[in-house]
Each structure stands twice: as C-alpha cells, then as structure tokens.
C-alpha cells in the first residue's frame, strides 16, 4: 500500500473531528455575528423557527428598581420591547443594581475569594421563562443603554411550566445523576463597548441536545461607564432537534481545543462528585522530587489551584491525595462558580475536607431542589464551628430551619450575606439575633420584618456594615434608625436604598448615634425633605463620610451641597441624581473642597446641563461626572 493512503486516512479523521466539534460548539470570538456555521449547514429535517419573547421573569440577583413598581426592574424583560431601538435612560427597561468598580471602592466592599476560576466573572443574573421549549438557534439581547455587560448565556433542562420532562431530558439527567441540567450557550470575558448607544447583541451560541424554555443571562458590569439597560431577550429555536449536515467550507483553528467547553467555562461539573469521592489510587515506589519538598511548600503550590483542579490532582497518587484533601486547603472556599452542579452529594463529599473552613460562599447554589434543608444542615453541623464568613446570596432553598442551624452551628460568624433570599419567611430572621458577633449583615431584598430587625440590632452591637436596601416589610424606619443610633455605635456603612418611610427624625437619631459612618445610601427615600435640615445636620454630624447617595431626592439644594463641602472633605462618591435645586456654583465649591471626590452623579439635575458637565470635567479631570441621557 502506498504511504499516501495512511496519510489520507489520518487527514480524513482529523477533518471529521473538526466538523464534529464545529457542529457541537459555535466559533468563539465572533461577538456580534449570527451563528458562524449557519450559512454552511442545513437542518434535517427542515424545522420552522419559532421566535419568542420572555413570558416571565423567574429569578434575578438584583435590580435598580423597587419591589413594588415596574420602573427599572427585571420584570421589564418579560414581553415585547418597550424602548428598542431608542437609546438612553428609560424607566421601562431592566437595570441591575451596580455598575463599574465603584461599589468595590467603598468602605463596605468585601474581600474577594481566592481560587475563583478566571473563566467565572459573573456578578449578577436574571432567569427568563418562555412559552415553548425549543432547541435554541439564536438569542437576541436588546440592550438600550451602555451595552456590553452580558458575559454568559445558559439554557436549563427544567421546564417551569411542566413537571414531566421529555425523553431526551430524562436520559441526560439519568446519565448525570442530577435533577436539573444547565448548559452554557455562550460565554466570554467582559469587553469594553465604545459608546452607550442601543444595540441588538446576537452572540454565536452552542447547539445543545435538549429543548429549553428557561434562559439565564449572567452579567459583569465592571467595565461599564454607567448602568446597563436591557429591554428584551428574544429566543429563536426549533421544536425538533436539528441534525447538522457535514458541509462546511472552512475550519476555524480556534475551535480545536484539547479542553472540553464545559471544563473551560466551569459549569459542566458532572464529574465533580466522582472526583470528590475518589478512593482508588495508584501506588508509586517514589514520589520523585515531591519527596524532597517540605509539606508546607506543596500546600502553598496547591493553594493556587481551583476546586476542580484540586479534585483532579487528588486522583494521581496517595501523596497528592493527602495534600489535596488537607482541610488547610479549604479555609476559604467559594462554590459560587460551580452553582449549576453543587448539590447535597457535593456537600457530603466536601465535609471531611472543610472541618477548618472559615469563609464559605454558597451564593446562587442549591436552587430547584439541588440542595435540601437536611443536606445544608448536615454540612454546617460538621463544618460550621470555625465559620467566620458565610455568603448565601440568592439561596432560595433557605428556610427558617436553615437560619436556626446557622445560628446554632456557627458561633464565630461575623459576616452573613442573605441578599435576595426572598423565600425566607419573615419570622425566621429572629434567629439572627443569637449571633452577637456579627459585624456584617446583608439583608437586601429580603422579607425581614420590623420586630426581627429590632431584635437583631439590640443584640448585635458589633455591627459595622448593614444593608437593608429594598426591605419593603419594615413599617417604621425611624424606629429602626433610632435603635441603630442607640445600639450600633460601630456602624461604618449603612444601605437604606429605597427605604420608603424614614424621616428627618430617624436621620437625626442615626447621625447622633453612629458618628463613625463612612458610607450611607439614602437613594430613592422620598420622605426625606431638605427643608427640614436633615441633610445639613447629617453632614455636620458625619464628617467621616466617604460615600453618600441621595439619589432621586428632588429637594437636595445648594445649602446641602455647601455643607457637604465644608464638613465632609473626605467625600469620595456623591449621587444627587434628579435634584432640581443644585446650581453649578455649589458643585464647584464641593469639587474644590473635596479633593478625594472621584464619582459625582448629576443625571437629570435640571440646572446642570452638558455644557456645565464639560466645564467641570475640564477643571476637575480626576472626577468622573455622570450624566445620563434619554434619546
């Protein structure tokens, strides 16, 4: 046989492998294109493409808007577009709570977890349900202001409107021993988009092998100059699974990658539990140079690995298994990057390794039955004694039993994050008062009631950081502020975003008792009026203020700004969006006096037009002056 034939066979096999990978995943790096292989493939049999807008918003991590209205809320993503193709700041869009890195520069900023995979950069998410399950062919995201925040799009096997999954889904779930399967359609690192104008974002998506009517967007707003606004998410798909023909004119070498996509993106963790539970290890006569390294040095080297990498390395030999399972490797553990695959079994396998754990991040995990109350409780009973920090943001499996277990099993707890845990019943929050060592408590978008919060403030006098943003079930914020002033003398940051009933009396009590405050968010608090002197009194009593948000308070006036300039010279961030009473002259005084000021939001301030902003930018180039627009 001629030598050319084996070579042709090898080339044919390589070509076939390339085509298979091409059919399985979309070409990476073509952000604004339609599907890269769409023009070179055909579906067999022919399917009619279904185009759907979201029927319902099922879940989200945060939003700018109120819990009792539609303005700037995630609920605006349901249905047809309200704004697109117009550009600008519109109340009918969906807006997340933060943008840029400003919140990371505040006194309330938390230290990041190490070992976070570089491919996981998501900060917020929203989940959307559609009427018909389809095999996705395209996802169109209508971004109307400061686009570029979306970093991941995922599809779920669960049907929100049916308890009986189709046969394909049942087979997948049985193979992976899970109840819900998430698949990444597209993922990419944050990128800077030039300009705030509206766009239709249509990334190249991966073909999946199950129908879906549940789509999840994950965003990272760290590179944005202002709040991103989303108008609608359009799902294109077909009812029958498309079979792509092997007809392609070009192979992109970026598609040839030794790693599977799910490993790269950190969501396909079907084998994680098997890696946790590995017991059969190879016997080696010698461990090579590892026998000569000090134990501590090997531990230091391994501390740079992610959790899946630790699990894989543990399967190589007994020596590295011992190191990878050492509880010292799990002092700080974030499971948030693997939220889609963490379940009761995962926690059970991790128990023996986490006996010394101090920081634990379970944010976004456990939903749709993945983690049970009993599974969570068993884990904390074994691993909770040394816990200092516990992140449980968007943990919808949490109930009163879970909070009771936390307060009993975690006597050293200092930081507790229950942000957007909106399924916890109001009476459950009473248990938090038992943790007298708390220094940080985040209750944003929870159903905490006044009686429970008063008890917490009374017994948790060590509190330094408290977030009560969008807590709509508190009836009298003046009483809450009075209790803070009397009991929480060490308070450094306080978030009262969208607090509906605090008055000048509560502000006076707060300012008199909590004079260490460095950060105060009073955005969208409509009952505060400048004419009562509440803001000038605040400025005089709190000279250490570095961040002050008075967002959407139309009564803020020159007198308030001038008092801030005189008394709060350490101010770094100020938001006075929406006021009609502030003049350019008072802003110049503020900028001249507050040398550290870096963020000033004057959006919708009627006396501060674009000409004034340009002039101030020229004279104070180190200050980012924000002014949104509506086209």
Image (cartoon, rainbow, N blue to C red):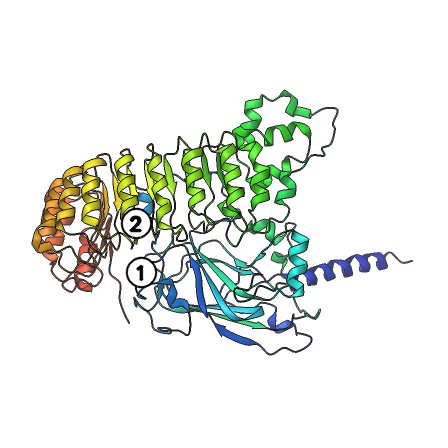
**Residue 146 seen in the figure:** no
Tell me if mark 1 has few (under 14), some (14-19) or many (20+) residues whose alpha carbon lies within 10 angstroms of its own.
many
**Residue 127 seen in the figure:** yes
The residue that label 2 is drawn on is 449
The residue that label 1 is drawn on is 65
Tell me if mark 2 has few (under 14), some (14-19) or many (20+) residues whose alpha carbon lies within 10 angstroms of its own.
some
Viewport quadrant of the N terminus: bottom right
Would you say 527 lies left or right of 93 here?
left
Q: Judging from the image, what secondary structure is the residue with disc 2 in?
A: loop
Q: Judging from the image, what secondary structure is the residue with disc 1 in?
A: loop
Would you say 394 lies left or right of 340 here?
left
Q: Nearer the viewer, residue 477 or 341?
A: 477
Q: Is residue 593 above or below residue 553?
A: above
**In percent of the image, x 7 and y 55: which residue is there?**
531
Residue 301 position by quadrant: top right
Residue 440, percent from left and from top: 33, 39
Circle nearer the viewer, 2 or 1 = 2
Q: Is residue 58 above or below residue 562?
A: below
Residue 107, percent from left and from top: 28, 40
Q: Nearer the viewer, residue 165 or 568?
A: 165
Would you say 444 lies left or right of 386 here?
left
Residue 188, percent from left and from top: 50, 56
């Amino acid at each position: 046989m001629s030598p050319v034939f084996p070579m042709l066979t090898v080339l044919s096999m390589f070509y076939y492998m390339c085509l298979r990978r091409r059919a399985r995943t979309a070409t990476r790096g073509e952000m604004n294109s339609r599907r890269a292989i769409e023009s070179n493939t055909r579906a067999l049999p022919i399917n009619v493409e279904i185009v759907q807008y979201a029927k319902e918003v099922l879940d989200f991590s945060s939003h700018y808007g109120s819990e009792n209205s539609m303005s700037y809320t995630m609920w605006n993503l349901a249905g047809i577009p309200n704004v697109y193709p117009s550009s600008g700041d519109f109340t009918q869009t969906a807006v997340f709570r933060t943008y840029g890195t400003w919140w990371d520069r505040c006194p309330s900023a938390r230290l990041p977890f190490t070992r976070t995979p570089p491919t996981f950069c998501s900060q917020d998410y929203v989940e959307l349900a559609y009427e018909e399950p389809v095999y996705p062919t395209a996802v169109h995201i209508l971004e109307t202001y400061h686009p570029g925040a979306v970093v991941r799009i995922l599809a779920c096997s669960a049907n929100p409107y049916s308890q009986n999954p189709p046969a394909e889904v049942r087979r997948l779930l049985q193979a992976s021993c899970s109840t819900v399967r998430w698949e990444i359609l597209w993922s990419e690192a944050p990128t800077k988009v030039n300009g705030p104008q509206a766009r239709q974002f249509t990334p190249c998506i991966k073909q999946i092998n199950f129908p879906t009517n549940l789509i999840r967007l994950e965003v990272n707003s760290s590179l944005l100059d202002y709040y991103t606004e989303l108008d609608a998410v359009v799902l294109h798909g077909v009812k029958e699974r498309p079979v792509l023909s092997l007809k392609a004119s070009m192979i992109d070498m970026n598609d040839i990658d030794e790693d599977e996509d799910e490993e790269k993106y950190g969501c396909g963790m079907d084998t994680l539990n098997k890696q946790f539970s590995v017991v059969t290890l190879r016997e080696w006569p010698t461990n090579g140079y590892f026998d000569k390294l000090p134990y501590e040095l090997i531990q230091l080297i391994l501390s740079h690995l992610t959790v899946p990498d630790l699990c894989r390395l543990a399967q190589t030999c007994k020596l590295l298994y011992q190191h990878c399972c050492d509880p010292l490797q799990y002092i700080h553990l974030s499971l948030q990057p693997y939220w889609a695959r963490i379940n009761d079994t995962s926690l059970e396998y991790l128990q023996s390794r986490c006996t010394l754990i101090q920081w634990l991040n379970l944010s976004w995990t456990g939903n749709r039955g993945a983690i049970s109350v009993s599974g969570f409780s068993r884990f904390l009973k074994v691993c909770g004694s040394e816990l200092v920090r516990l992140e449980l943001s968007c943990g919808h499996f949490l109930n009163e039993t879970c909070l009771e277990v936390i307060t009993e099993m975690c006597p050293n707890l200092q930081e507790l994050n229950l942000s957007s845990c909106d399924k916890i019943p109001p009476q459950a929050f009473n248990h938090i008062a038992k943790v007298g060592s708390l220094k940080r408590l985040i209750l944003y978008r929870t159903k905490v009631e006044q009686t429970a919060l008063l008890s917490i403030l009374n017994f948790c006098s060590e509190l330094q950081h408290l977030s009560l943003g969008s807590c709509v079930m508190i009836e009298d914020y003046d009483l809450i502020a009075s209790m803070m002033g009397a009991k929480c003398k060490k308070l450094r940051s306080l978030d009262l975003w969208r607090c509906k009933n605090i008055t000048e009396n509560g502000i006076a009590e707060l300012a008199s008792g909590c004079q260490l405050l460095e950060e105060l968010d009073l955005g969208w608090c409509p009952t505060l009026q400048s004419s009562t002197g509440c803001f000038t009194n605040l400025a005089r009593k709190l000279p250490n203020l570095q961040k002050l948000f008075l967002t959407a308070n139309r009564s803020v006036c020159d007198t308030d700004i001038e008092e801030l300039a005189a008394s709060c010279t350490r101010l770094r961030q100020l938001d006075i969006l929406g006021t009609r009473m502030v003049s350019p002259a008072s802003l110049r005084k503020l900028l001249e006096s507050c040398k550290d000021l870096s963020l000033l939001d004057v959006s919708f301030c009627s006396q501060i037009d674009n000409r004034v902003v340009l002039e101030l930018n020229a004279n104070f180039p180190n200050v980012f002056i924000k002014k949104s627009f509506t086209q």
